[in-house]
Image: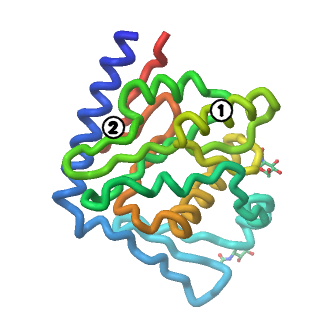
Amino acid sequence: MRRSYQSGGLALVSLASVVLYLSLHRRQLVPGTPAVAKDSRTTTLTDGTSTFLLNHSLYEAHFPHLQRYQCQEVIARDALCQGPARAPLLLLAIKSHPASGSKRAALRRTWARPAEVGGFWLQPLFLLGAASSDKDAELVGLESHTFGDILMWDFAESHHNLSLKERCFLRWVHQHCQRAAYVFKGRRTRSCAAGARPCSLRQAK
Ligand SMILES: *[C@@H]1O[C@H](CO)[C@@H](O)[C@H](O)[C@H]1NC(C)=O
Ligand SMILES: *[C@@H]1O[C@H](CO)[C@@H](O)[C@H](O)[C@H]1NC(C)=O
């Protein structure tokens, strides 16, 4: 318990630094538009320092279901996008596994809860793929009803489908949450990527 609160505190401190960084560098963080190369079968993606050439035919050959999948939310929460109008909305998106309810509970007890910090409204949300059992699905449903911080899609939850989570989440932000000024993405339920260093959160006993 204690450890969880300690690391939770650490996460909050790092989060506060991120918020501070964001407020200082608001202008520079505007995302660039990917450049589509002349050959339409490749796309050049750049973040300013490195460039990645995406070969569409190779990609489609290796991961056909990633191409075909149409995002379908089974739990959609448009209310996540509210919050006081005076504060810019910062979404804290945390990829999570449907069966990891106790880890989500531990995060909610520490930093993953809606709050105003440094002039930003922080709204945590957990990103989930489909539950593999009825029991997990039922528990996630109850959790979502209680906390309202879950977005869930109907693709199978698996490591290889994580990019679907990214894509569907960005689509959701675009379609339902244009109010969001910033998105801060955590990598897993147990850790949060704050600033340059990932920080681990231990599960409360
Ligand atoms: C993309 O990959 C395919 C299959 O390996 C290859 O034939 C094609 O030349 C590649 N395209 C480019 C633009 O590199
Ligand atoms: C990813 O999700 C799709 C759609 O649910 C599923 O068909 C596919 O098997 C999943 N991939 C993996 C590797 O689990």
Q: Residues within 10 Å of mark 1 (few under 14, many from 20)?
A: few
Residue 117's x, y, as percent?
24, 44
Residue 83's x, y, as percent?
37, 53
Which numbered tag is attached to residue 2?
none
| Residue 176 appears left or right of 32 | right
Residue 110's x, y, as percent?
37, 26
Above/below status of 36 relative to 72: below
Residue 88's x, y, as percent?
29, 59
Q: Residues within 10 Å of mark 2 (few under 14, many from 20)?
A: few
Judging by the rendered image, the residue that carries numbered circle 1 is 142
Q: Secondary structure at mark 2?
A: strand
| Residue 131 appears left or right of 110 | right
**Which quarter of the picture shows residue 24?**
bottom left
Identified at 27% across, 45% down, the residue is 116
Contact (Cβ within 8 Å) of mark 1 with mark 2: no
Q: Amino acid at mark 2?
A: Arg
**Which quarter of the picture shows residue 58?**
bottom right
Above/below status of 20 relative to 146: below
Distance between mark 1 and mark 2 Cα atoms: 33 Å
Judging by the rendered image, the residue that carries numbered circle 2 is 197
Q: Amino acid at mark 1?
A: Leu
**Nearest the eye: 61 or 171:** 171
